[in-house]
Image (tube, helix red, strand yellow):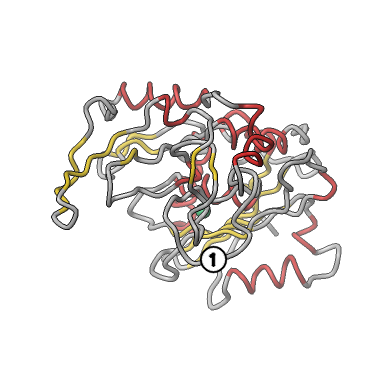
Amino acid sequence: MLKAVEPGHNNRLADRINLIIVGKGYQNMNEFLTTMNRDLGFDGLEKLNPESLDKLLFGLFAIEPFKSQRSKFNLWYYPEQLQSKSPEEFLQQNRDNPGSSAKDFGLPFATYLFFVNPVESPQSFAYPSNVPPGVAPVKSAFVFGSATVTRYPNVADGVSVVAHELGHSIFNLRDEYVRTGPDVGDKYGHNIARTQAEARQLWGSVETQVDPFYYTWKEKMIANSLWIDSSNPLFVQYDAKQGIDIYTWYPNEEEIKVGYLQGGGVTTTGISWRPTKTSLMNNEDVRNKSWPKFPPVFGSANRRVMQSVLDLYSGK
Ligand SMILES: [Zn+2]
């Protein structure tokens, strides 16, 4: 009963990850599908969108590693929107409690992506997969999670949230937010370490590397006259409380180069280590100090984890 997002792309029998997409809260099926297709960017191309603040949209498949490894995914959508049912209830019914042949619609390596009109639900979030940090991943043990993205049909800004949430739900990456907050538990992982020694174990193999997609993205931003260089940052506002001017810019090479940076993971103590100053898993603009905008770039430490999972699928 699931339908193919892109005619001719899916192969039910192929060795792939099955992404099942479900809509909720849109005026009709067509509005949901239009929103979904805009944000997936299946053709792999970034899109100019002058009405948006972002101007240039990097949908899921315009971002690496999704862009070059589209063949590792089957893309399905559920042919009806959820009405009164919540995403959690849908998961209960189709993932947790069905007969074994009906589980995940009979698809192996399934992961769910809910598109919800923000009128219905305010915040994007994800249940992470179980890909364990620090050891070679074992395919047969994978249980992928689910993600909910809140996306307006008529506002395209923030499209890279889809890739961010799949970073959690498929690859078990952690948030690299530097703010401190309530202890929500389980915040350490592939890209958030308790100590610098642990950080070296987790991502030491890609130390000093720059995600090649950074250069691709930067070139496209420059070509569209959208680049804000750190040497000439953009004035945001005067912060009267702190008595300082606040600036922003797009990250320079150093700020996306893998190293060992303190903070990240929303900790109560603020004691943690992350691989890069900013990245797509740091999908949060900091406004109370001068800081680079987050890019649609995962960074080499996260890319290493993602690749180690994707390498286990032939796509055929
Ligand atoms: Zn997140």
Residue 158 or 256: which is nearer the viewer?
Answer: 256
Q: Quarter of the image containing the C terminus? A: top right
Q: Is residue 228 visible?
A: yes
Q: Does residue 12 appear left or right of residue 241 in this picture? A: right
The picture places residue 148, in percent across and down from the top left corner, at 54, 60
The picture places residue 315, in percent across and down from the top left corner, at 74, 34
> Which residue is pictured at 61% across the width and 45% down the height?
195
Q: Is residue 76 visible?
A: no
Which residue has dot 1 on it?
Answer: 183
Q: Is residue 277 above or below residue 205?
A: below
Q: Quadrant of residue 11?
A: top right
Q: Quadrant of residue 196?
A: top right
Q: Secondary structure at mark 1?
A: loop
Q: Does residue 33 appear left or right of residue 158 in this picture? A: right
The picture places residue 234, in percent across and down from the top left corner, at 21, 36
User: How many tags in the picture?
Assistant: 1
> Which residue is pictured at 49% across the width and 62% down the height?
268
Dot 1: within a 10 Å radius of its alpha carbon, few (fewer than 14), some, or many (20 or more) residues?
A: few
Mark 1 sits near ligand 1, with its Cβ under 8 Å away: no
- Furthest residue in direction bottom, as rendered: 84
Q: Quadrant of residue 236?
A: top left
Q: Quarter of the image containing the N terminus? A: bottom right
Name the amino acid, label 1: Asp
The picture places residue 296, in percent across and down from the top left corner, at 45, 37
> Which residue is pictured at 46% across the width and 57% down the height?
30
